[in-house]
Image (cartoon, grey):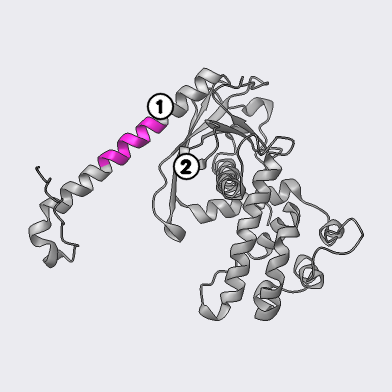
Amino acid sequence: MDVPAVTSTASSVPAVGQRWKLPDISEQSVSKLGVLRARDVLKAPLESLLQMPRRPNGTSLVQQAAFFKRLLSEEMELKQAASGDVSGAQHDLRHLSCEQLLALRVHSLDFLTRSASHSAHINFLDSVNGRLLEKVAARFLEGQDLEDHKMNPDLLRALGAKLLLVLGAAVVVAREHPESPAPARWAIALDAVDGTDARAALVHTEDLRLDLLRPDDPWTFGEAAPVAVVSDRTSGEGLARRLHWEVIAVEPSTASVLGELARRNEGAARRQKLSSELADLIRIRTAPRASELGLDPVVAAPAAVVG
């Protein structure tokens, strides 16, 4: 399955102020589109995919090389593999390249099960996803000092998940608005929980590069084409998460990008606070009928102790 390219022609460069909305879309489906887009950009020939990593002395780092070669060449589907083989190969995933992990993930995109009888396959796919997110983020950051940006595996996974969503969102916009595609460069805010001292990231969706933008660094945008800024109001948990994004094209300048990110983050914080206050009000108003309505009872806050 191929996905549409997100390249803009000279005649279709978006205007500053142009907006696109991605309302109420399954986050998982957008992430899958991101996986497919990354695969298409980094696509490696089968001969290259079948070359397993080796030690300096020439011996293979991958113990279950034959198993992976069957999966990568599509001689076998993951769901057909014996549980013992799947469990035995899981440890080797750390040695595979980004391209190999992308190929494995693409081949198993339609394998959806949480059945206990497939626990080995579920664990394998969870490991593939985790390793893939690390390798995708590292590939985007290629040539940069990861230690300088305080990047550890957990942070790389969190960043990798965001990058796949951006790639997937760019595909959705290209599909639904072929006459007005979004900019090739997307700016996303990085929360404090991301652990890095970067304030934002500039994602290059056409060639899979990433610039981490720190407050004290000079931001250079190069070309004059607009930058897409994301306002994220995604809701839900796990497989039920629904993506709600609004994207706006802004001028490629530090002030424009930072200003728009700040405005959108403040707006999202206000909406979250209002939503929380409304939920609390509803719980208080319905407290007398909580049992009848099947709601959890409202627990009163403990009284302050006066000394």
> Which segment is the magenta one?
265-274
Look at label 2 and name its amino acid. Answer: Val
Residue marked by disc 2: 193
Look at label 1 and name its amino acid. Answer: Arg
Residue most extreme to the right: 57
The quarter of the image holding the C terminus is top left
Residue 220, image x and y in percent?
A: 64, 21
Residue marked by disc 1: 263
The quarter of the image holding the N terminus is bottom right
Q: Is residue 193 visible?
A: yes
Q: Nearer the viewer, mark 1 or mark 2?
A: 2
Residue most extreme to the front: 307
The chief SS type of the magenta part is helix
Instruction: Residue 212: name its quadrant.
Output: top right
Residue 274, image x and y in percent?
A: 26, 39
Q: Is residue 32 above or below residue 146?
A: below
